[in-house]
């Protein structure tokens, strides 16, 4: 039911003011029905009006308007529409309240989800608004009707017209506008609309998520990072998916250490092999080698294949003795492991053992690198022998 107060004194002119147009027969009965309605006897008033028999078109139109109002008061939408349609389509009600009558008919159509006839009347109403009537919300009703009919391109100008009136209620028109912009794939235009919605409802996480999604869609990754980090700063309860996206945006922005920290704060970050691997890679990009080694070690306890990542960084960082113990745990990668051991043993000045590993590497998978190590270590050992 439409939540709008329409009193009989507003909608129905008095019998004395229309006595010159109504027949005496109809005027008397209209007055009686009016009095019954004022005494809260609306059903009796309806019955009284239905008994009126007249051939005068104006009388019929006037009675139909009264019946429409009474049916509306009783919550009988269908018969109210029928009667008000008769009154409006007659074109005979030219008084001040003719506009109000058509407005009521349009609202009833909208309430009854008959959007096409509602629009016809709203567009008629908007063309000539009496000075005594408020009509700004007609544009909102027009937008609502077009939205229900999925006429997205017509929703947006209607909401813009309504928003120009600077209404106190902005949430609904902005929501209608946003929905239409998304349907029309107007991504860039939708961004300022969502930003206005965030101002109205800063605690509604869905607006923030939609804004981030649109910013990413149009290639504004920095803005997406700012939006998501601000949402977190404002204390919104971000999901694990949101927080993971935040980490990825930090990494994409070139802040891998922040990305690694963000991943480490996720649920199961210490046990989920995918998250451990991602975190370790971020630490590597940030050149935080020891932190990367620590995380790779945690990953290797879950999946042995990550022993190789640990060993590589250990050799790189000069932890040669420790790297040898880890390299012994690596399965497969025979040539690569042998070459890594070659380097570690060389750094530990264990030249004989280093040469053995270099030959293992070359036997497993001949390569220029392995041959270079063999040549270099052989020469080095010979020179040391001569010196010795």
Image (cartoon, rainbow, N blue to C red):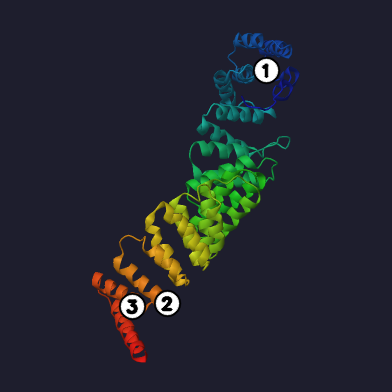
Q: Which quarter of the picture shows residue 16? A: top right
Residue 258, position as x, y percentages in the image: 57, 60
Q: Nearer the viewer, residue 289 or 8?
A: 289
Give the CA distance from mark 2 to mark 3.
12 Å
Residue to which mark 2 is pinned: 347
Quote the CA–CA distance across marks 1 and 2: 114 Å
Q: Is residue 75 left or right of residue 357?
A: right
Q: Secondary structure at mark 3?
A: helix
Q: Is residue 189 above or below residue 289?
A: above
**Residue 188 seen by the camera:** no
Residue 270 picture location, percent across and down = 50, 51
Label 1 vs 2, first from the N-terminus: 1
The C terminus - image quarter: bottom left
Direction from residue 272 to residue 170 in the image, left or right:
right
Identify whether 175 is placed above or below 81.
Answer: below
- x 61%, y 29%: residue: 102
Per the model, the C-alpha gap separating discs 3 and 1 is: 122 Å
Percent position (x, y) of residue 178?
A: 55, 46
Q: Which mark is residue 352?
A: 3
Q: Mark 3 or mark 1, which has the lower sequence index? A: 1
Between label 2 and label 3, give the one nearer the viewer. 3
On the question of residue 307 being in view, the answer is yes
Residue 290 in percent (x, y) is at 52, 65
Q: Residue furthest bottom?
A: 387
In-image side of 260 versus 371 (left or right): right
Residue 156 sits above or below residue 387 on the image: above
Q: Please identify, in this view, whether the residue under mark 1 or under mark 2 is nearer the observer.
A: 2
Residue receiving disc 1: 22
């Amino acid at each position: 039911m439409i939540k709008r107060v329409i009193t009989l004194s507003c909608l129905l002119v008095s019998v004395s003011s229309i006595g010159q147009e109504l027949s005496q027969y109809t005027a008397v009965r209209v007055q009686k029905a009016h009095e019954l309605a004022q005494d809260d006897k609306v059903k009796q008033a309806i019955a009284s009006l239905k008994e009126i028999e007249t051939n005068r078109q104006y009388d019929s139109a006037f009675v139909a308007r009264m019946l429409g109002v009474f049916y509306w008061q009783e919550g009988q939408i269908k018969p109210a529409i029928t009667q008000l349609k008769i009154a409006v389509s007659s074109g005979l009600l030219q008084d001040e309240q003719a506009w109000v009558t058509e407005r009521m008919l349009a609202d009833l159509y909208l309430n009854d989800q008959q959007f096409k006839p509602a629009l016809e009347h709203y567009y008629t109403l908007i063309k000539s608004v009496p000075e005594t009537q408020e009509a700004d919300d007609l544009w909102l009703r027009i937008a609502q009707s077009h939205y229900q009919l999925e006429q997205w391109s017509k929703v947006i100008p209607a909401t813009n017209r309504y928003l120009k009136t600077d209404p106190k209620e902005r949430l609904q028109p902005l929501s209608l506008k946003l929905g239409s912009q998304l349907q029309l794939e107007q991504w860039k235009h939708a961004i300022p609309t969502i930003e206005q919605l965030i101002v109205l409802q800063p605690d509604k996480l869905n607006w923030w998520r939609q804004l981030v999604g649109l910013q990413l869609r149009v290639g504004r990754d920095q803005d997406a990072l700012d939006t998501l980090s601000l949402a977190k700063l404002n204390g919104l309860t971000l999901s694990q998916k949101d927080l993971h996206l935040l980490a990825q945006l930090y990494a994409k922005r070139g802040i891998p250490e922040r990305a690694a920290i963000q991943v480490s704060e996720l649920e199961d970050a210490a046990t989920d092999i995918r998250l451990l691997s991602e975190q370790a890679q971020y630490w590597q990009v940030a050149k935080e080698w020891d932190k990367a080694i620590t995380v790779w070690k945690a990953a290797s306890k879950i999946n042995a294949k990550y022993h190789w990542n640990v060993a590589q960084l250990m050799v790189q960082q000069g932890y040669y003795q420790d790297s040898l113990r880890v390299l012994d745990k690596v399965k497969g990668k025979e040539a690569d492991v042998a070459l890594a051991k070659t380097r570690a043993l060389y750094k530990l000045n264990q030249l004989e053992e280093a040469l053995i590993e270099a030959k293992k590497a070359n036997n497993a998978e001949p390569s220029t690198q392995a041959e270079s190590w063999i040549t270099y270590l052989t020469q080095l050992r010979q020179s040391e022998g001569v010196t010795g």
